[in-house]
Image (cartoon, rainbow, N blue to C red):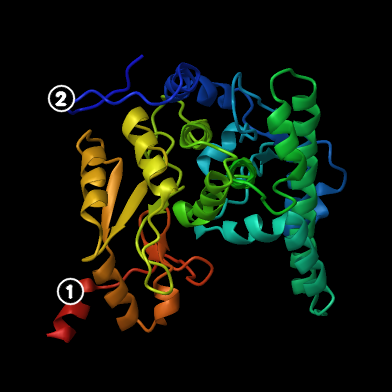
Amino acid sequence: MEFYTSSDCKRPVRLSRKTRNFAYESLNHKYGKDTLKTPNVSLNHIENYENMSPIEKYNTAIYEIVTKAPVRICDGELLSGAATLGDAITHQLPAAYKNEERGAPTGVSHLTVDFFEVLEIGMDGIREKAKKSLATHTDPSKTEFIKSCIHCIDCMEIWRMRYIDELSKRQGFERITENMKRVPFSPAASFYEAVQSIWFCFSFLRLTGCWPGFGRIDVLLGKYLDADLKNNKITLYEAREILAHFFIKGCEWITGEDTVSGDAQHYQNIVLSGIDENGNDVTNEVTYLVLDIIEETGISDFPTTVRINKKTDEKFLTRVAEVIRYGGGVVAVYNEDLILESLADMGYPQIEARAFANDGCWEVQIPGKTNFSYIPFDALKLYSKSL
């Protein structure tokens, strides 16, 4: 099979035939069509539902989702986890009560999730932090929220166990099963575990109608790949195959139907390269693997931005240009120097500014720091005042 390009150059072939076939089927709506078969889970059987508080309704819906949503395992997949309820594609909680509250409330987006903490301490560690926080609060509104957070983590574990049970029944999924027994609830100990951990958390959030961004994926995964390569635990070819499945799985909401946001563009933005908080270049093997995968498959469902500055290596600039030439707007470029200058003018400390990523509509933000909201303003008026 061939992957579309507006360039005269044919896309390179690096991935295995099985992985390329998986990508081709995903891009041609196989799994998106499957997702539409089950729009949501029903809440009609829940007693006293109408008298519950909003957060109680939400907790109930999350439990029903993780216990009733279809589990999907694709032939030959190297990562497991899927967002299998169609209403989640519309940015809504995919749970319906007598068709009166279908899809309510709206999911959360324009947010870059702190996957760093997931990889470093696991969901078990995050749950323990939530429990300690609960012990310090007496305000009912805060305690109810923290309890809901703990409940959602418990529900994620139920969802994970459903996958482990299903994977254990099938041949050929032994390695994924072992990974899933550890992550995302324990810290990642390898590149493969790290990719699986991020993917499962991301797919769980999407399952609940939320559209999170990824941020700096090469910073997230780089140290794990470097360590595995150094210790001969993995080859670059194997790492590329695993990471390719991350991108391919992200095509699970391509339906081929009309959409106002671009088919399967659900705010899961990725940022590559640039400098870290100490001013050091972060470009690593993962950076180049991501470009390899995008170049070969043309997958655009993770809007990918590259941070470029005055000191960016010419080799890397050339590699970015090689990928961009295939068209489709798959890779965008940020002027890192200009953005850092603008963030400094806004009052961001340098160490925070250098961590910038972006969110669903490309707005620059500091993961875990920026509180996004839509605020209309008169740009011409602001400009005139600066003259």
Q: Tag on residue 8?
A: 2
Residue 260 appears at what percent x and percent y? 37, 39
Of residues 383 and 362, the one drawn nearer to the viewer in this rendering: 362
Q: Residue furthest left?
A: 387
User: Does residue 69 appear anywhere in the picture?
Assistant: no
177 sits to left or right of 21:
right
Amino acid type indicated by mark 2: Asp
207 sits to left or right of 329:
right
Note whether 22 is above or below 329 in the view shown. above
Question: How many other residues sit within 10 Å of disc 2, few (<14), some (14-19) or many (≥20)?
Answer: few
Residue under label 1, please give it: 380
Q: Tag on residue 229?
A: none
60 sits to left or right of 237:
right
Q: Quadrant of the N terminus?
A: top left
Note whether 385 is above or below 270 in the view shown. below
User: Does residue 318 appear anywhere in the picture?
Assistant: yes
Note whether 284 is above or below 250 in the view shown. below
Amino acid type indicated by mark 1: Leu
Residue at 74 percent of width and 26 percent of height: 167
Q: Quadrant of the C terminus?
A: bottom left
Instruction: Return the disc, 1 or 2, that comes first in the chain's sequence.
Output: 2
Q: Which of marks 1 and 2 is in front?
A: 2
The quadrant where residue 292 appears: top left
Residue 47 appears at what percent x and percent y? 88, 44
Residue at 60 percent of width and 29 percent of height: 78
Of residues 171 and 229, the one drawn nearer to the viewer in this rendering: 229
Mark 1 lies on a secondary structure that is helix
Residue at 45 percent of width and 24 percent of height: 23
Mark 2 lies on a secondary structure that is loop
Note whether 292 is above or below 267 in the view shown. above
